[in-house]
Image: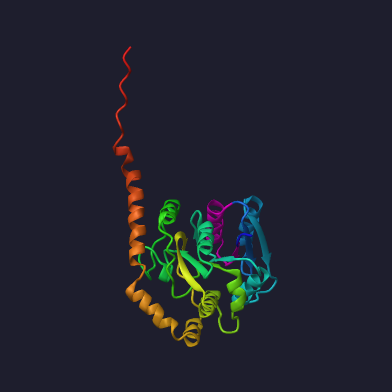
Amino acid sequence: MGAIVLLPLGVDDAVLDRCLAALDAGTAAGTSIWLADDAQAGPRAQAVVEHWLAHTPLQAEYTRRARPLGEVAHLDEMLRACDGLDVAVLAPDSVPAPGWLQQLQATFARDAAIATATPWCNVGETAAWPRLGELNPEPGDPALLAHVCAALPSLHPELPSAVTHAVLVRANARRRAGGLDAESYLGWNAALVDLSLRMAGLGWRNVLCENAFVSRASEAPSRDGDLEALAARWPGWVPRLADFLMHDPLHTLRQDLQHGLQQAIMPRGQGDLFVPPSPLEPPV
């Protein structure tokens, strides 16, 4: 059975509309997707959801709580309801490029020891492109970028932890590691990082899926005390993260993606400059 996509809703109707349009354009028809609203979406966002549900080719469900449960507890509730399924969690402002989920699932198929697969992102921290750890602009041509990503060798280098613009989480690894820790973290970004570190402690891998790209409008928000809680629980994580950012083990891979994109763009930009002459008329 295929993975299910989980999209916890935020309050911004414009970014939600953009995310849903990208999902329709870049995800295989019939893919299961769950839009879960922890009493966050206002009337305009709910209207966006209603219109989308009536037209999407995806197999979509929408739930809304009468009262907010809290974002970590709410996402944990969603994950528990998907027991036995690989789950792709998307940030509310994400813009998945074409083929994103197919590539994440292919990453899982290549190595059963992979617990989480994270795609590239313009603001993806350790998975950022084109510059590591920076707030890069969103790509101008996501479809072309997705095509170039798909052509990269599938090496799946290890990351210090999952990154939560978009992450595919393996079902049996999630079951062994337990649920999200709603007591220690206020934001589900930190809670998912914590889950990925627990899975790594059990011998699983958190990797980059270099064959997929999911952009987003801004960097992941950090709730008060969450980074401190992560550092206290995982004292080795912060030094490992700093070492990763300092030595940039993905440098060559990011250069390969940049070079591939430049090569793909050049024929497009120059094609109209080299129009071949019309063939000669055949002799009568």
Residue 137 drawn at (x, y percent) = 39, 61
Name the residue: 44% across, 65% down: 156
Farthest right residue in view:
66
Choose between 190 and 258: the one closer to the eye.
258
Whether residue 38 can be seen here: no
Name the residue: 36% across, 63% down: 253
Q: Is residue 71 above or below residue 13?
A: below
Q: Quadrant of the C terminus?
A: top left
Whether residue 122 can be seen here: yes
Name the residue: 66% across, 52% down: 54
Residue 177 drawn at (x, y percent) = 59, 78
Q: Is residue 90 above or below residue 222?
A: above
Name the residue: 56% across, 84% down: 184
Q: Is residue 83 above or below residue 255?
A: below
Name the image colouring.
rainbow
Whether residue 135 appears in magenta in the rendering, the answer is no
Q: Quadrant of the N terminus?
A: bottom right
Residue range in magenta is 4-28
Q: Is residue 109 above or below residue 220?
A: above
**Is 49 left, or right, of 126 in this rendering?**
right
Residue 180 drawn at (x, y percent) = 59, 78
Farthest top residue in view:
284
**Is 219 left, or right, of 274 in this rendering?**
right
Whether residue 25 appears in magenta in the rendering, the answer is yes
Choose between 210 and 73: the one closer to the eye.
210
Quarter of the view holding residue 120: bottom left
Q: How many marks?
A: 0
Residue 152 drawn at (x, y percent) = 40, 57
